[in-house]
Image: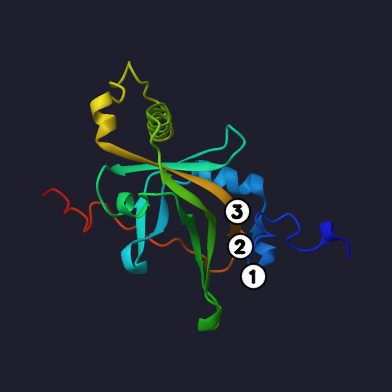
Amino acid sequence: MPRETKVGATNAGRDDPRSAIRRRDRGKDDEWAASFLRRAAYGFLATVGEGGQPFLNSNLFVFDDAGGQPRIYLHTHRTGRTRDNLGAAEKVAFSAVAMGRLLPAPEALEFSVEYAGVVAFGTGCVVEDRDEARTALQMLLDKYAPHLRPGVDYRPTTDDELSRTAVYRIDIETWSGKQKEAAAEFPGAFALEATPVPFPARSPSV
């Protein structure tokens, strides 16, 4: 069978063992993966700290591939475990996900869920170039507050604020995109109630 007709022949990251997926029929291509990361609201950065201790940082992020190299930017305070773990360029993993409807079935083992997500592997580092860091922070603001303009609706990041912030870049080396979707009329499909924030939910005003 010609390669281009095989299931998963266009899957992102199919030739790299880090990103090759078992369910190739649910895999997505590079364009889908990039589009999903542009839209996803938050993600999880995996690093390794002292003694081999894994650490996850859940955070807002922005995806950028304008220069041809897909990369992810995020930021934290200047101190903390993420900053400690990325004191030098290190191998990292990053994931962003979205959950759809729950899919009931006659047998417990066959219950399922709709989902979409991307897992990326690459090198993470602290952005030391101030211009790049400032640009990354503005890209974050543009993503999450696209209706507000710097210098009009808010004051842009100052040099002092920049010095108190750690900006990270993940240079993506390989990634995978994966999605499960069911028919709109799937019997009994239902959405799980979202976890309220703040948690627990505030009591209604009396």
Disc 2, SS: loop
Q: Amino acid at mark 3?
A: Thr
Disc 3, SS: strand
Q: Amino acid at mark 1?
A: Arg
Mark 2 / mark 1, whichever is N-terminal: 1
Q: Position of residue 51 (x, y in %)?
A: 33, 68
| Outermost residue, top side | 152
Residue at position x 25%, y 30% from top?
A: 161
Vertical arrangement, residue 80 with respect to residue 75, above or below: below
Q: In the rendered view, does 80 fall on the left or right side of 149?
A: left
Rate crowding at label 1 as few (under 14), some (14 to 19) or many (20 or more) other CA atoms within 10 Å.
Answer: few
Q: Which of the pair 189/163 is nearer the observer?
A: 163
Rate crowding at label 2 as few (under 14), some (14 to 19) or many (20 or more) other CA atoms within 10 Å.
Answer: some
| Outermost residue, left side | 206
Mark 2 / mark 3, whichever is N-terminal: 3
Residue at position x 16%, y 54% from top?
A: 203
Rate crowding at label 3 as few (under 14), some (14 to 19) or many (20 or more) other CA atoms within 10 Å.
Answer: many
State which mark lies toward you, 1 or 3. Answer: 3
Q: Write down the residue under mark 1.
A: 22
State which mark lies toward you, 2 or 3. Answer: 3
Q: Write down the residue under mark 2.
A: 182
Using the numbered discs, state the Cα–Cα distance from disc 2 to disc 1 in whole angstroms. Answer: 19 Å
Residue 105 lies in quadrant = bottom right
Q: Position of residue 150 (x, y in %)?
A: 35, 20
Mark 1 / mark 3, whichever is N-terminal: 1
Residue at position x 59%, y 65% from top?
A: 186
State which mark lies toward you, 2 or 1. Answer: 1
Q: Which of the pair 168/36 is nearer the observer?
A: 168
Q: Write down the residue under mark 3.
A: 174
Using the numbered discs, state the Cα–Cα distance from disc 1 to disc 3 in whole angstroms. Answer: 16 Å
Disc 1, SS: loop
